[in-house]
Image: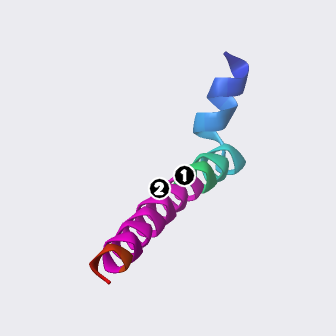
């Protein structure tokens, strides 16, 4: 319980949460980006 209190009430804890959120957000963005481009390339190959 003390670790959760430190995580949500201290500056280094909030920065850690922020970094984790940004990292997961960028991971989701790049996953979508690459999958979309892979599908577009496959469709382009199928059209040839």
Dot 1, crowdedness within 10 Å: few (<14), some or many (≥20)?
few
Taking 30 as reference, is 3 above or below it? above
Q: Label 1, secondary structure: give it.
A: helix
- Residue occupied by mark 2: 28
The x, y position of residue 2, in whole percent, is 71, 20
Question: Is 9 positioned to the left or the right of 39 in the image?
Answer: right
Front residue of 33/20: it is 33
Front residue of 32/41: it is 41
Q: Main secondary structure of the magenta part?
A: helix
The x, y position of residue 7, in whole percent, is 65, 35
Q: Which mark is residue 45?
A: none
Q: Are marks 1 and 2 in contact (CB under 8 Å)?
A: yes
Taking the spot 62% from the left edge, 55% from the top edge, the residue there is 19
Question: Is 9 positioned to the left or the right of 26 in the image?
Answer: right
Specify whether residue 20 is painted magenta. no
Q: Label 2, secondary structure: give it.
A: helix
Q: Tell me where the magenta segment starts and ends, as one range.
A: 22-44
C-alpha separation, residue under disc 1 versus residue under disc 2: 6 Å
Taking the spot 33% from the left edge, 80% from the top edge, the residue there is 44
Front residue of 8/47: it is 47
Which picture quadrant has residue 36? bottom left
Q: Which mark is residue 24?
A: 1
Taking 6 as reference, is 11 above or below it? below
Front residue of 41/18: it is 41
Taking the spot 72% from the left edge, 25% from the top edge, the residue there is 3
Dot 2, crowdedness within 10 Å: few (<14), some or many (≥20)?
few
Quarter placement of the C terminus: bottom left
Taking the spot 47% from the left edge, 55% from the top edge, the residue there is 28
């Amino acid at each position: 319980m003390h670790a959760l209190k430190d995580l949500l009430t201290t500056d280094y804890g909030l920065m850690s949460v922020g970094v984790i959120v940004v990292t997961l957000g960028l991971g989701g963005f790049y996953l979508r980006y690459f999958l979309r481009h892979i599908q577009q390339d496959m469709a382009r190959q199928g059209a040839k």
